[in-house]
Amino acid sequence: MELQASYIQIVALALFTIGLAVTLTRRNVFFVLMGIELALNAVNLSLIGFAKTLPAAASVAGQILPLFTIAVAAAEACVGLAMIILIFKSQESVDIDNYSNMKG
Amino acid sequence: MLALIYFIILGVIAVGSALCVLLSRHPLYGALSLVVSMVSLAGIYGLLGSPFVGVVQIMVYAGAIMMLLTFVIMVLNGARDSKTPMFDKVSLFVFPAILLLAALLGFALISTPLAFNAETLRGSVALTSETLFNTNNKGPGYFLLFEVIGLLLLSAMIAAVLLAKKNLGSKETEEITEVH
């Protein structure tokens, strides 16, 4: 038994599924953000796992793309948390069902 | 063989702590188990032969982003409403849909032939920096993306400061500035 390339993809799929479930079903707004982060992590793992199945020159691209994903995730978390602080000041609640000012 | 054992240990830790995020009640416990999940993912990156991404994962994700998240959770005291239920009633329908999606994707993954390539380069610091900052005309041009990421982070930081600040130019802020 050796480490197979598809095992990595299966772990990434499990993490992505859990992240999606956290995002869509939890009511606390912090858990929604954490679910998004988890799904982004799963995509990074999938990118690295696929990069290892490519030949030499092409495999470097798959190892550089996660760096950009991490930077974009940092920007997203920064702005998202600022928005949470702003909404929490006006609503006094972390329940995402109360955030219905826009009647969505 | 040894790689498989390490991968199973790290993968079980990563998926298990992700499940802890799904099932924990207090957001602080969820954030801490998310940190554990990210650190074990960094271990998997190192195992697969891209140590630089693993170090960046620990420094930026487990260090900076999760520090910010736990800080905001502690400042806002998110445990205040522990009366609201953890899950919606809608999640009765959402969970089967997500499981169906996972089953479909898993079937597609298992039926796809995937194999490691022996010629894959190890993503060390030297190779990553060479490729990332290759300003050659015929190079991949990642350095332009790098500059754009810098601008993006700067604008995100300014946006966050402006959003979280009290209303600019309002009477309250003027009083505060007068007092000091």
Image: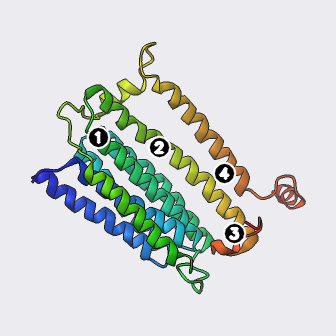
The residue where tag 2 is placed is A69
At 56% across and 54% down in the image, what residue appears?
Answer: A77
- Residues B2 and B29: in front is B2
Residue B55 visible in rendering: no
In the image, are marks 4 and 1 on the same chain? Answer: yes
B96 with respect to A26 (left or right) = left
Quadrant where the C terminus of chain A lies? Answer: bottom right
- What chain letter is assigned to the residue under label 4? B
Instruction: Specify few, some or many for label 1: CA neighbours under 10 Å numbering under 14, 14-19, or 20 or more.
Output: many
Instruction: Identify the residue at horizontal 50%, vertical 78% (top origin).
Output: B92
Q: Position of residue A33 (x, y in %)?
A: 54, 62
Q: Label 4, on which residue?
A: B160
Q: Position of residue A96 (x, y in %)?
A: 64, 71
- Say what amino acid the circle numbered 4 marks: Ala
Numbered disc 1: secondary structure: loop
Which mark is in front, 3 or 2? 2
Which scheme is used to colour this image of the protein? rainbow
Going from N to C along the chain, the mark reached first, 3 or 2, is 2
Chain where mark 1 sits:
B
Kindly identify which residue carries mark 1: B50
Kindly identify the amino acid type of the residue bearing the numbered disc 1: Ser
Reading the chain from its start, which is encountered first: label 4 or label 1?
A: 1
**Quadrant for the N terminus of chain A in the image:** bottom left
Disc 2 secondary structure class: helix
4 or 2: mark nearer the eye: 2
- Distance, label 2 to label 1, CA atoms, is 15 Å
